[in-house]
Image (cartoon, rainbow, N blue to C red):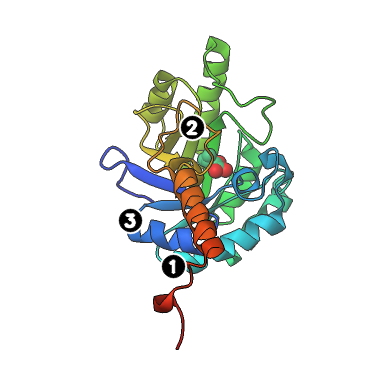
Amino acid sequence: MLEGLKGNKKVVMLTAYDYQVARLLEQAGVDLILVGDSLGMVVLGYESTKQVTMQEMLHHTRAVSRGARNTPIIGDMPIGSYATPELALENARKFIEAGAIGVKVEGCVKEVIHELISNKIPVMGHLGLLPQTAEKYKLVGKLDNEAEKIFEDAQAIDKLGVFSMVLECMPEQLAKKITENVKSITIGIGAGKYCDGQVLVINDLLGMDERFKPKYVKKYADMSEIIKKAAMEFKKEVESGEFPDDAHSFH
Ligand code: KIV
């Protein structure tokens, strides 16, 4: 998957969790859609991604696959769903049935990755900040030993055959070194400009939550203001009797 793109074209991935957004992302021409377990925080209102279940992930993967029939969809395996290689395979197959073409797993889980790839399930890795196990969401890989471990992990999962890996919240020089030393496509989030591609959580890119302002997120729209303004205008017009007017009524 994504053959020929490394070094030739930047890969564009965005998350989606529902039918309508998936449809729009397909029209926009993104290369990949990730049904991320960020679902838990931005859609379901959980404290972290740790509460997300397989059932919830599959429900949203099905919705996304109905909206984006021609864009590769990656299912993000939630915490616990790949605790053993056997469980990982069973759950990865459920993602494929739900419409994903591959799955993403966090960390250097070599046996899991090996099991999935030997059973022909394309795997995207995820290194650096690992939201499923991190105590704090912060930059990682600044210390030499931390950077060395992430680099070794990247080489190990690359060797196992991941087609791509997300690099999250790390210094751009570390992401550059990894990108230059692996065959797979690196997709950065808070990992700088040298990655082979970039991903953002769609709700962050759209500015859905005015309280969330991490350094690595660029807001391409201010949807929290747009939605609030539209709802307030509707409220005002309903309360004043201005809506529905003749144009929006049946006669
Ligand atoms: O869950 C998610 O949305 C992710 C991306 C941040 C890569 O893992």
> Which label belongs to residue 69?
1
Q: Secondary structure at mark 1?
A: loop
Numbered label tally: 3
> Which label belongs to residue 29?
3
In the visual, does 99 lie left or right of 12?
A: right
Residue at 37% from the left image edge and 50% from the top image edge:
2
Viewer-side residue, 93 vs 74 = 74
Viewer-side residue, 145 vs 116 = 145
Could you say which quadrant of the image residue 49 lies in?
Answer: top right
Which residue type does callout 2 highlight? Leu
How packed is label 2: few (under 14 Cα within 10 Å), some, or many (20 or more)? Answer: many
Report the residue marked by disc 2. 167
Residue at the outermost bottom position: 251
Give the CA distance from mark 2 to mark 1: 27 Å
Give the CA distance from mark 3 to mark 1: 12 Å
Q: Quadrant of ligand 1?
A: top right
Mark nearer the viewer, 2 or 3 = 3
In the visual, does 210 lie left or right of 59?
A: left
Which residue type does callout 1 highlight? Arg
In the visual, does 6 lie left or right of 152?
A: left
